[in-house]
Image (cartoon, rainbow, N blue to C red):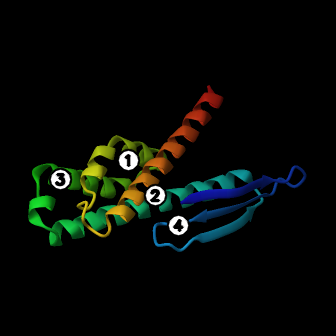
Amino acid sequence: MFIVESYNICPITGITDFVIKFDIGTGRVVTDKRGYYDRQDADKYIIGIKRSYILDLFGRYVYHAIILNETGTRSFYATPERMESLDICQRANQYFQEESINAICTYILQIEKHLRRILPSPGNKSRQSSDDKLLEMIMFSKQVCKSINKIKEVEA
């Protein structure tokens, strides 16, 4: 969950204040309330928090898949397709460390089938929470990509 709960710009002073709420899948909602004298600084901060959010969510998801791959039932977790997908996701996690949120979210949408392949087995107790995290990553990435496309349309 990542929500910009409020975002206000004072027409007189130009001060931008906002409230962000997010949960990286730990069940603990973090509330971040800030104000900036410059709207661009506020926007840069929000983009940075969004980037950290998706990196953390993706990293936890892939790490969990690695652990299950090492400890789970070999017949389910060690298939060639699953190993290929896990490798792609691990490389993506490394690649993301130097990339913009736009690139990260675009690539997450491109590798969705690989992210689905590394879900826990249907009988695993973490299957539902992993499925929920995957859905959150996909929805968040679509939202980021959609807002980027709106900005591009306005600039054109």
Neighbor class of circle 3 (other Cα within 10 Å; few <14, some 14-19, many 20+) is: many
Quarter of the image where one finds residue 97: bottom left
In the picture of the structure, the residue carrying the numbered disc 1 is 108
Neighbor class of circle 4 (other Cα within 10 Å; few <14, some 14-19, many 20+) is: some
Neighbor class of circle 1 (other Cα within 10 Å; few <14, some 14-19, many 20+) is: many
Foreground label between 2 and 3: 3
- Farthest front residue? 123
- Identity of the residue drawn at 10% across and 64% down: 74
Q: Are marks 1 and 2 in contact (CB under 8 Å)?
A: yes
Q: From the viewer's perspective, tell me whether residue 40 is left or right of residue 24.
A: right
Q: Which mark is residue 82?
A: 3
Secondary structure beneath disc 3? helix
In the picture of the structure, the residue carrying the numbered disc 4 is 23
Look at label 3 and name its amino acid: Arg
Q: CA distance from mark 1 to mark 4?
A: 19 Å
Which of the two residues, 92 or 110, is positioned nearer the viewer here?
A: 110
Q: Along the polypeptide, which appears first: circle 2 or circle 3?
A: 2
Which of the two residues, 143 or 77, is positioned nearer the viewer here?
A: 77
Q: Along the polypeptide, which appears first: circle 1 or circle 3?
A: 3
Q: Are marks 4 and 2 in contact (CB under 8 Å)?
A: no
Q: Along the polypeptide, which appears first: circle 4 or circle 2?
A: 4
